[in-house]
Amino acid sequence: MRRKVIAGNWKMHKDLNETQSLVTKLSNALSKEEVKCDVIICPPYTSLSEASSLIKDSVIKLGAQNMHFEEKGAFTGEVSTSMIKSVGCEYVILGHSERRTVFGENDEVINKKIKKALASNLKPIFCVGETLGERESGIMKDVIKRQVTDGLQQVSKGEMEKIIVAYEPVWAIGTGKTASPEQAQEVHVFIRELISEIFGNDTAENLIIQYGGSVKPDNAHELLSQNDIDGALVGGACLEADSFTAIIKSV
Ligand code: PGA
C-alpha cells in the first residue's frame, strides 16, 4: 500500500501573522489526531522560516511553491534551492498550472527546475494537467504525456523515486468543479502507465500521485478512496485549519 500524502498549497495567501495563527491551529489540531498520512504545507517564501519553527514538534513537513534552477546570480526576484532548504523545506511544488499559464513556464523550464531540485536533495511535487479545451478536444492524454515525458527528461530511476506527481486538471483548480473520482482515477492510471514505460513497473507502483483541483472536506474521502489516488494537493481548503484538518482526517 502506498502511503497517502496531503499537501496544502497556500499560493499568495497569508502574511506572517496569519501564518503564525494558521500553523499553530493546524499543529494543535493534528496533535490530537492519529494522522494516517504525510502532511506538507507550502506557504509563501516570506512565511517559510516562521512556519518551519512552528512545525518543529509536529508531523507537518514543509515545502516551497517554486524555485529557480540556477544556484545563485543576477536573477532579481528569484529564490534558489539552497535558500529554501536553509529555511527548512524538504519539498517544492514545480510545474503548477499557475506557473505554466500565468508566468509562462514551459516543459523545458520545469524540467530544469526538477533536475535542480533533485540535485539539491529537495523532493519535487510535479504538477501536470489539461485545460478544459484540451479535454474537450480529445487531446488530454497527449498533453499529459508531453508534460510528463518532457518534464522528466534526464531524470534517473533513483531520482524518480523522490518525486510526487500531482494531477491537477486546470479546469478544476479554484473553480469549485472537481474531477469526478472516476475521471481522476482514469488519468492517474494513465500517468502510472507512462511512468512504468519510462522507469519500470516497480517505480510506477510506488509512485505517489496526488489529485488536485477543488478538493474539499466533502469530496476528499471519495477521491482518496480510488486505487490510484494517493493524496491531494489542496489550494483553497488548506487556508483554514478546520477544512485542511478535515481533509487529512478523511484519509
Ligand atoms: P484548489 O487549488 O484546491 O483551490 O482548486 C489546488 C491547486 O491549485 O493546487
Image (tube, rainbow, N blue to C red):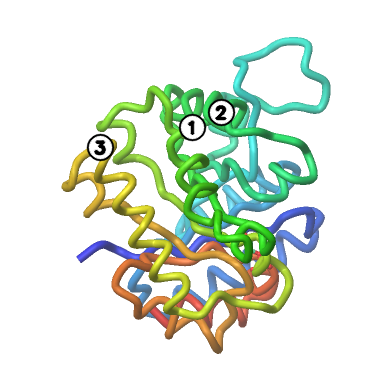
- Which residue type carries mark 2? Lys
| Quadrant housing residue 13 | bottom right
Q: State the quadrant of the N terminus.
A: bottom left
Which comes sooner in the sequence, label 2 or label 1?
2
Q: Residue furthest front?
A: 137
Which comes sooner in the sequence, label 3 or label 1?
1
Find disc 2 in the rendering and name its residue. 113
Q: Is residue 177 above or below residue 98?
A: below
- Which residue type carries mark 1? Asp
The Cα–Cα distance between marks 2 and 3, rounded to whole angstroms, is 20 Å
Which mark lies nearer to you, 2 or 1? 1
The Cα–Cα distance between marks 2 and 1, rounded to whole angstroms, is 12 Å
| Residue 90 can be seen in this image | no
Foreground residue among 75 and 63: 75
Residue shown at the point (63%, 48%) measured from the top left = 96
Q: Is residue 97 above or below residue 10?
A: above
Find disc 3 in the rendering and name its residue. 199
Which mark lies nearer to you, 2 or 3? 3
Find disc 1 in the rendering and name its residue. 150
Mark 3, other Cα within 10 Å: few <14 / some 14–19 / many ≥20: some
| Quadrant housing residue 107 | top right
The Cα–Cα distance between marks 3 and 1, rounded to whole angstroms, is 14 Å
